[in-house]
Amino acid sequence: MDVRQLYDRKLTTAEEAVSIIKSGDWVDYGWCSGHPRVLDEALAARYEELHDVNIRGGVCLWKPAIFDVPDFAEHFTWNSWHMSGAERKQIATGGCFYAPIRYSELPRYYRDHILENDVLMCQVTEMDEHGYFNFGPNPSHLMAAAENSNKIIVEVNKNLPRVLGGFEECIHVSQVDMIVEGRNDNIAQLFSPGVTDIDRQVAKHIMEEIPNGACIQLGIGGMPNAVGMMIAGSDLKDLGVHTEMYVDAFVEMTENGRITGMKKTIDKGRQVFAFAAGTQKLYDFINENPKVMAAPVNYTNDIRTLSSIDNFMSINNAVEFDLFGQVNAESSGVAHISGAGGQLDFVLGAYLSKGGKSFICCSSTFKTKTGEVKSRIVPTMKQGSIITDTRANTHFLVTEYGRANIKGMSTWQKAEAIISIAHPDFRDELIKDAEKMNIWRRSNKR
């Protein structure tokens, strides 16, 4: 059958498409900017007749319609692979939970049938002449989810950029069950905060370690993106990109001539990512651009892939780290913030790379809601805080006060190095804590 005829045969309304969802079903919303819009609204309209419908998604760039139904937790449960602000706020309803993962493993969860999934519904681009819908900026794990779903519903959005692949960046019309033509909403944008003086100081410490020809990964968060913006204004050259999340800083780095990708040991000349989120400028840049390559996360984040790239530089954010060198990038005590994502994979992969380095960065202090200044470097993690990167794996820790390479150090050496990059107002107190924990030598510098 001609692909256009197949398309027309499968075309339906959002209301008809979501009518197949039953109480107790598991429904996958896809990922980030590819979450469904009109299908979500149609499902929310059915809330009174549905109970215990489990939804999977992650990195919400807007508040899903189902979040606003009365007694949300009675009807739906949102299970997030990585939380955004909209998802964090929903935790208080009792119907929103984080699913801890190593992001690189996510496709395998579907393919090995660790996860059950009744329906996959997500946004895609218009069908091309060969019958393919492109996943846009979000290939991530979507093909694996499609392979393990009983029904596949795609919501067509003409404004979604078509991103060229490596592989698994699109799905054929013969593989989907229903097609819904959406409203063609503008793709949701993610704006980064402005670069602060602290960001500049952190970036300076990191950039001193980055050689020409290095391959860059930037994690989710304002500070890694700020480091990228600082790199864009530097005189570094022939940089490459291999990252989990593609952000605006990479566009700036490309336009400023910092990125060519010609020194990469794999995927030469191409900027590789699992998903992209940013401003319209980013979406316009990645649309049908041969310079970029969208690929599944089990390729982009796999330690074996990362270790094969020479001079790989991984730059990620943290909530806090302690005097043992443990990194928390996920929570404040039991209060959930984001997720593990691919941080540990990039920490491990960068260190295995020839000439590679991993940087975990944060400001040395933060202000509470009452205006109290507190240290992000703590003696030990408070109860409930999540360890994202263990003390055995951490490489460089960076604040505005410097960088510390803690690989191979004894506990007393790590404590001294980490305290040296803490805010000066907290160093004496941290030394006292280190003494109490028996990780401070009398010969250590004060």
Image (tube, helix red, strand yellow):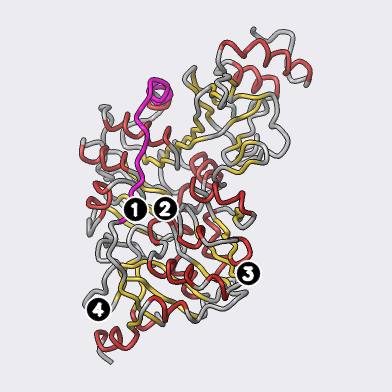
Q: Position of residue 121 (x, y in %)?
A: 44, 71
Q: Position of residue 324 (x, y in %)?
A: 68, 28
Which label belongs to residue 188?
1
SS for dot 1: loop
Of residue 62 and residue 323, the one placed in the foreground of this image is 62
The residue segment tinted magenta is 187-204
Seen at 62% across and 14% down, the residue is 426
Which of discs 1 and 4 lies nearer the camera? The answer is 1
Q: Position of residue 327 (x, y in %)?
A: 60, 35
| Residue at which label 4 appears | 130
Q: CA distance from mark 1 to mark 2?
A: 7 Å
Which label belongs to residue 62?
2
The vertical placement of 358 against 120, above or below, is above
Q: CA distance from mark 4 to mark 2?
A: 32 Å
Q: Is residue 12 visible?
A: yes
Q: Is mark 1 in CB contact (under 8 Å) with mark 2?
A: yes
Q: Quadrant of residue 325?
A: top right
For badge 3, the amino acid type reads Asp
For badge 1, the amino acid type reads Ala
Which label belongs to residue 52?
3
Q: Quadrant of residue 8?
A: bottom left
Which of discs 3 and 4 lies nearer the camera? The answer is 3
